[in-house]
Amino acid sequence: PAYERAAQMFVDTVRQVGADQWEHIALGEWTVRDLVGHTNRALLTVETYLGQPAAVVEVERPADYFIRARAALADPAAVAARGREAGQALGADPVTAVRETAERVLAKVGGAVDDACLTTPVGGMRLIDYLPTRVFELTVHTLDLSAAISVPVTLPEGAAALTLDLVADLVASRPDRVAPLLLAATGRQALPPGFSVFSNPSTCAKKH
């Protein structure tokens, strides 16, 4: 349900993009179109990997996916290029493209078993462990999109909880980040400039 609700939140927010906003800068060097295209990959990759069964589970936790990806897939230039390509792939009607992708992928997820083993770029994962990484992407980047087009968004409770759980696991894997986050979350002090659970604050969740 969290993945489905996060996907629907994304679809609903994309529907509110104005005709004149698609080429506006949204995140880093990405336009709104690029950002939507990149976020749409949180749907498309599930579809792709469901079609690529893995024989062995190599990545057991959602956080481990990002930890491995941070080391292997984090070339900023490549990430930016993939975002632009994904944006162009949306075609002349991005709203319809995103809606149809969500409908198709959610139907496939609904028909799959939780323990289905997928081949991801960082190793075999169970579907139930991979989906939280996509909830994270959909949640964070829908917030990015919301800010870019000045439209408020309410996070579904399940998606918000999964995303925060993943943030906690990522921070716990980097002990130097734990104290600053705890102090900020409890009102003691502001986060340091550029704080991120990822190595490079400028790219944050853009990497995957």
Image: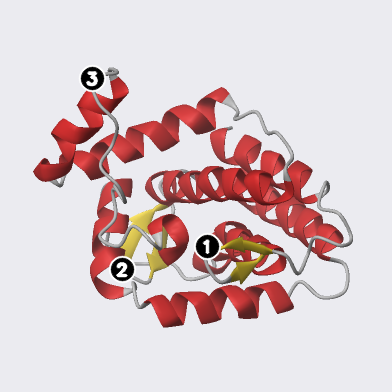
* Residue drawn 19% across the image and 34% down it: 180
Front tag of 1 and 3: 3
Gap in angstroms between the C-alphas marked 1 and 2: 15 Å
Kind of residue indicated by mark 1: Leu
Q: Is residue 44 visible?
A: yes
Q: Residue at x 30, y 47 (%)?
A: 193
Among numbered discs 1 and 2, the one appearing first in the sequence: 1
Which quadrant holds the C terminus?
bottom left
Q: Nearer the viewer, residue 16 or 122?
A: 16
Residue under label 3, please give it.
188
Which of disc 3 and disc 1 is earlier in sequence? 1
Q: Quadrant of the N terminus?
A: top right
Three-letter amino acid code at the position of disc 2: Val
Mark 3 crowdedness (10 Å alpha carbons): few <14, some 14-19, many ≥20 = few
Decide if residue 116 is on the left or right side of residue 74.
right
Residue in front for this viewpoint, 153 or 166: 153
Residue assigned mark 1? 50
Disc 1 crowd rating (10 Å Cα; few below 14, some 14-19, many 20+) is: many
Q: CA distance from mark 3 to mark 2?
A: 37 Å
- Image coordinates of residue 113 in percent, x first then y, are 50, 45
Of circles 3 and 2, the one toward us is 3
Cβ–Cβ below 8 Å for labels 3 and 2?
Answer: no
SS label for mark 3: loop
Going by the numbered disc 3, the residue's amino acid type is Arg
Q: Measured from the top left, where is residue 187 in percent x and y?
A: 29, 18
Which residue is labeled 2 in the image?
A: 122
